[in-house]
Amino acid sequence: MLEKALEDWLARGGARTFNIQPATFTGSLRGVQAVAQIEPDDILVTVPEELLVSTSAARSSTDFSPYLHEAASLSPLQVLAAFLLFELSKGSASFWSPYLDSLPHTYTSLFWFSPQEAEQLQAPHAIAAAEAARQEVRQSHAAVRPLLARLGIPDKYRGLSAMRWALATLNSRTMYLDGDPAGVLMPFGDLHNHSPPPAPALPDLGGAQRLGGPDQDGMQPSLCSEHKGHGDGTFDSETRVYKLHARTRYLPGEQVFLCYGSHSNLDLLEHYGFVLDDNPHDAALLPVGALPDGQLQGSVQPRECWLHPCGTPSWGLLRALRTWAATSCGHGARKHAALEGMRVSQESEAIAMSALRSLCSGVLDDLPTSCSNDEEILARDIISGALSEQEVLAVRWRRLYKQSLLNCIALAQAVMYDCQYAAEQGQCLS
């Protein structure tokens, strides 16, 4: 249930909910529950502009905006972080105090990882992401500190830990707002949990289907509004209210979700502080420098060098592997087939899959623990509770990362076997 003060404040401000209520689900997870049947496109909640915490509100504030002319270099996110801390420092005198009082005091996103906890991620790119989050806190704090000092707020709201809290709050809870890259805090709306959009199309390792679709440029789609089955938020410029709509049918008692975007588990951990065991948009990043050939390394962009959770390589990585393998075995004249998403030959496909298998095996060998080790660590922690929340999330993330690599090794091995069998049977590709 909502805190009574927040519920009353929302009602006085004109916020409305339709057939939903706050609820607690399995594992003490707070979320939003349907109390009656909800149909696609039904409005779930409306919140007037006056209740939103945004840069527009910051620039309209008579006791905050006069100081902004000396802070023209701040990004919209830094302005919103400063405004959030300014309002928080007012305590009960803030218009938004019932909402601010309801916000978490701590988070589990990468902003909240200590260097020691970040090391538990093991994969270098994930550790680097955690360090980048800490660096963002330090840089934003240095940029915003003069403004906070001129505002005259107490020291506890001007320190590095306060900035970490503000950035973690904004990264995990803001809604999209057209024209404002900082987004907007929407009271009540930010109670909805995430459900990912449908899985992207996968490259066809059989070669029968032309590759492309959502994975065409090496990345995954980011617009959830195109997918039925997920909530969607928009600001109505005529009525000046923010609305959330349902994108699927919900029955009474079911949890009502929003879609935060097509995020990998590392993205979810970085910004929202959780990972999904079954995330169709997860992406296991691989180091380009570990590819077995310099020419191959030069043909793959870092943003393309990743695996789907099932082990299938991205379109960009598979295309580069097939093109390189075709040249390696003397079939360079037919490498155009690789560019069209098809096998070049049984021989070249086996070479490509062998390189992919070696790449994944090498990455796994360089990590301190195995996937099964991580499963044992998590099982022991259920009993002992010795790990911090961040450490548990780190182990969960790295286990899922390693599982994607293991899936790729098994997939590559199966394709290599099929190629060998086809060659023995005298089958060839026309």
Image (cartoon, grey):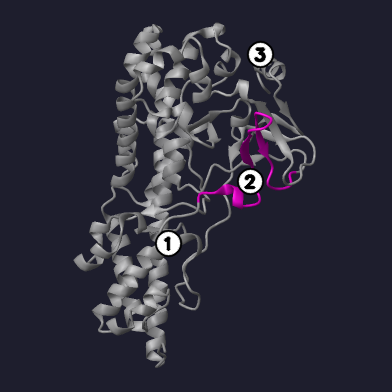
CB under 8 Å between discs 3 and 1:
no
Q: Quadrant of the C terminus?
A: bottom left
The answer to whether 174 is drawn above or below residue 157 in the figure is: below
Q: Which residue is mark 1?
A: 407
Nearer the observer: mark 1 or 2; the answer is: 2
Query: Does 303 appear in magenta?
Result: no
| Front residue of this view, candidates 288 and 58 | 58
Q: Earlier in the sequence, mark 3 or mark 1?
A: 3
Question: Disc 3 to disc 1, how far (Cα)?
Answer: 50 Å
Residue identified by numbered label 3: 5
Residue under the image location 57 percent in, 51 percent down: 197
Please determine whether, in this image, residue 95 is positioned above or below residue 32: above
Task: Based on the picture, tell me whether residue 235 belongs to the magenta stretch.
Answer: yes
Residue named by callout 2 = 230
Instruction: Examine the rendered structure and indicate whether residue 5 appears above or below residue 237.
Output: above
Magenta stretch: give its range: 222-250
As shown in the figure, which amino acid type bears the numbered disc 3? Ala
